[in-house]
Image (tube, rainbow, N blue to C red):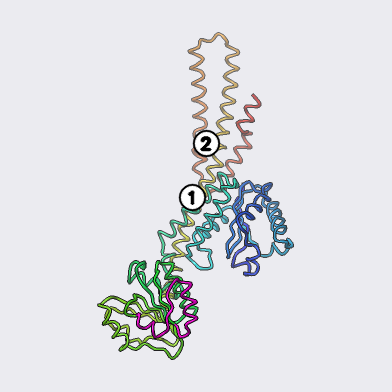
């Protein structure tokens, strides 16, 4: 049995190709059902950055061909157009790839939180549709466990790497919880909107949006369920809010003297000023005022760059965790192969022992019952002792390949059959 990953992602295909392959769950299951003759189990993952099949099969080449046919049929594309963007990983490489995907090490944005939920949704959809079994259930369960370890034991997801998310991370450190905080946005440009979205996602519910053009202020305020104001009206709100986000064009500047007047009316409450203006909107001396936290775009960029470096270090720790988890998975999978081999070996010996014992009884029909039981117990004990060392030694072999080879050799040497085959012969 082979486990393969077959798909494309942001590193192998441009967005105009990836968007062609994005599928809703019902269509994804349609593709998997089309592969049922070649794939015993399957999960289909479709996000904006990847389209991947996770499949259990005994016929890799034929399965890939069937995948091309299914995709070509649904997307009305020629098979040659499908093939050139796709990659294929098998067994340990496939496990490692899945674990990296679930842990967001293979994402366009390293450490993103959404991908684990997307992988879980894809798996659950396939499981509920009866498309998974013992193999994929075990593999995906371990992938989710590995992803949780990476997130809990490394800094991979705790270091924002873009300016807006850095600003919000700083706000959380200053105020702990943002649920009760109010934000004043001065300037309604793209950077303001992006940062405001991060703030809203972090719990902020009170927004004032002030802009030179009131219509733009109204547009952004409506997206945030906030209140729109003129720029002059917005400045007066500095006495009330906890966070000021400013990204106004040139010609706008907040001097230390102006901010100082507002601070006196705040009663000592802390204020966080995020200056994303280029040129800067806030005088650097404002940061020297008591209870004022001022960060401009250069400060935020420096933190983001430092976090990228730290996050890259966290990748090394994460990769180590994943390698360990893949090794554990491989051992579990090997045990699945060894268990039936050992069972068949015992069944084979028991079949021979019982046949010889019955032949013995036929030749000595008048043997007392007590002696019959003693002889049967003796033959069983001999069989168990003969099998003990081969069983232990087979389990001791560390290499996955060697263990499979040992299992294969046992099958050939002893002509091992399934228990059902033995029963039929008897």
- Give the quarter of the image for residue 211: bottom left
Whether residue 297 is visible to the viewer of this picture, yes or no, is: no
Element carrying mark 2: helix
Q: From what the image shows, is residue 378 above or below residue 299? A: above
Residue 225 colored magenta? yes
Q: How many marks?
A: 2
Which residue shows up at 30% across the image and 83% down it?
262
Which marked residue is nearer to the observer: mark 2 or mark 1? 1
Residue 143 colored magenta? no
Element carrying mark 1: helix
- The CA span between labels 2 and 1 is 23 Å
Closest to the observer, 283 or 318: 283
Residue 268 placement, left or right of 8:
left
Residue 221 appears at what percent x and percent y?
46, 75
Residue 213 appears at what percent x and percent y?
48, 84
Q: From what the image shows, is residue 337 above or below residue 113? A: above
**Residue extending farthest top:** 366
- Give the quarter of the image for residue 418: top right
On the image, numbered disc 1 is attached to which residue? 328
On the image, numbered disc 2 is attached to which residue? 390
Which residue range is magenta in the image?
Answer: 211-237
Closest to the observer, 169 or 248: 248
Residue 198 appears at what percent x and percent y?
44, 70
């Amino acid at each position: 049995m082979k486990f393969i990953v077959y798909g494309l992602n942001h590193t192998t295909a441009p967005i105009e190709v990836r968007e062609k392959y994005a599928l809703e769950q019902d269509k994804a299951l349609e593709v998997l059902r089309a592969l049922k003759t070649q794939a015993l189990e399957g999960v289909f993952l479709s996000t904006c950055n990847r389209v991947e099949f996770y499949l259990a099969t005994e016929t890799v080449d034929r399965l890939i061909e069937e995948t091309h046919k299914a995709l070509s049929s649904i997307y009305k594309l020629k098979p040659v157009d499908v093939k050139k963007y796709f990659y294929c990983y098998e067994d340990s490489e496939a496990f490692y790839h899945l674990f990296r995907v679930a842990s967001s090490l293979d994402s366009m944005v390293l450490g993103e939180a959404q991908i684990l939920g997307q992988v879980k949704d894809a798996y659950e959809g396939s499981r509920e549709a009866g498309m998974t079994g013992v193999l994929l259930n075990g593999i995906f369960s371990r992938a989710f466990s590995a992803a949780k370890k990476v997130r809990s034991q490394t800094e991979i997801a705790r270091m924002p790497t873009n300016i807006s998310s850095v600003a919000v991370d700083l706000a959380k450190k200053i105020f702990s919880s943002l649920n009760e905080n109010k934000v004043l946005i001065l300037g309604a440009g793209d950077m303001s909107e992006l940062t405001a979205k991060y703030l809203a996602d972090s719990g902020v519910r009170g927004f004032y949006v002030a802009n030179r053009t009131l219509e733009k202020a109204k547009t952004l305020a409506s997206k945030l369920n906030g209140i729109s104001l003129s720029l002059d009206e917005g400045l007066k709100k500095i006495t009330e809010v906890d966070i000021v986000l400013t990204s106004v064009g040139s010609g706008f500047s907040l001097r230390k003297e102006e901010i100082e007047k507002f601070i006196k009316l705040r009663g000592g409450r802390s204020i966080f000023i995020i200056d994303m203006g280029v040129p800067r909107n806030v005088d650097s001396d404002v940061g020297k005022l008591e209870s004022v936290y001022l960060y401009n775009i250069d400060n935020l960029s420096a933190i983001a760059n430092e976090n990228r470096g730290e996050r890259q270090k966290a990748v090394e720790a994460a990769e180590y965790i994943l390698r360990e988890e893949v090794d554990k998975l491989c051992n579990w999978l090997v045990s699945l192969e060894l268990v039936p081999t050992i069972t068949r070996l015992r069944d084979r010996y028991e079949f021979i022992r019982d046949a010889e014992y019955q032949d013995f009884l036929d030749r000595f029909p008048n043997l007392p019952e007590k002696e019959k039981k003693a002889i049967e117990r003796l033959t069983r004990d001999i069989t168990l002792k003969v099998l003990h060392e081969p069983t232990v030694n087979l389990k001791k072999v560390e290499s996955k390949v060697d263990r499979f080879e040992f299992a294969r050799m046992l099958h050939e040497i002893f002509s091992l059959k399934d228990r059902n085959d033995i029963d039929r012969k008897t």
